[in-house]
Amino acid sequence: MLSEKMTEALNAQLNMELQAYYTYLSMAAFFEDQSLKGFSTWMFHHSEEEMAHAMKIYDYIYERRGRVKLSGLADPPHDWETPLAAIETAMVHEQKVTASIHQLVKLAREEGDYATDSFLQWFVDEQVEEEAVVDDLIQKLKLIGDFSPGLYLLDRELIATQPDAGEEQA
Ligand SMILES: [Fe+2]
Ligand SMILES: [Fe+2]
């Protein structure tokens, strides 16, 4: 069984993943409004991944006979000055999530809860990958700067790399 402290910490992480889902969905809407379909589709998929992370934690809490307690989400931001500013917000959020996952691992080890430690390793690896993907986008946007044809091309590239790219381009 999970300790009370661990249950509380996992519920806080569950809330953080849902907050990421909500923030990225808001970003998808922002990009949609900017007619950047590639960015909006990319962000929408990213938001779905965050929901999947939340559900992974949800399932794990029950598997260990804990209790899921959902708490409120904050209003996400709606507007950003530039696409780069939006993606940088995503990076800040990812870094917060990474730090929070690392704190959870620390707690699991302190408690000798090896099952939770093992469960969390998937998230540790996932965060490395997510930060790298977001950073790649930031570097490309910095390279493009104010050159709008570059932004247009990157948007097209993002559509092409989506899992449902066939549908999008049809
Ligand atoms: Fe996540
Ligand atoms: Fe993430």
Image (spheres, rainbow, N blue to C red):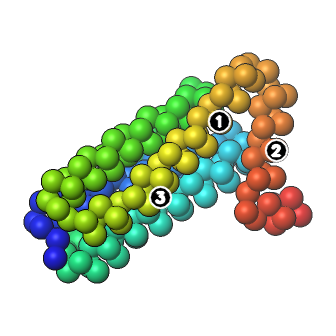
- The answer, for residue 97, to whether it is visible in the render is yes
Name the residue type under label 2: Arg
Mark 1 surroundings: few (<14), some (14-19) or many (≥20) residues within 10 A = few
In-image side of 7 versus 131 (left or right): left
From mark 3 to mark 1, how far is it between C-alphas? 19 Å
**In the depicted structure, whether residue 42 falls above or below residue 148:** below
Q: What element carries label 3?
A: helix
Q: Residue 136 carries which label?
A: 1
Q: Which residue is drawn at 41% across and 38% down?
A: 95
* Residue type pointed to by label 1: Asp
Residue 100 percent coordinates (x, y): 30, 46
- Between disc 1 and disc 2, whose residue precedes? 1
Q: Are marks 2 and 3 in contact (CB under 8 Å)?
A: no
How many numbered marks does the figure carry?
3
Front: mark 1 or 2:
1
Residue 72 in sight: no
Q: Is mark 1 on a helix, strand or loop?
A: helix
Q: Residue 50 carries which label?
A: 3
Task: Check the image and name the residue furthest to the right.
Answer: 170
Kindly identify the residue that appears in the image at 75 percent across and 23 percent down.
144
Q: Quadrant of residue 17?
A: bottom left
Q: Residue furthest left?
A: 4
Residue found 82% across the figure and 44% down from its top:
156
Q: In the image, what residue type sits under mark 3?
A: Glu
Q: Nearer the viewer, residue 75 or 164?
A: 164
In the image, 13 versus 145, the foreground residue is 13
Residue at which label 2 appears: 156
Q: Is residue 36 or residue 131 the one in the foreground? A: 131
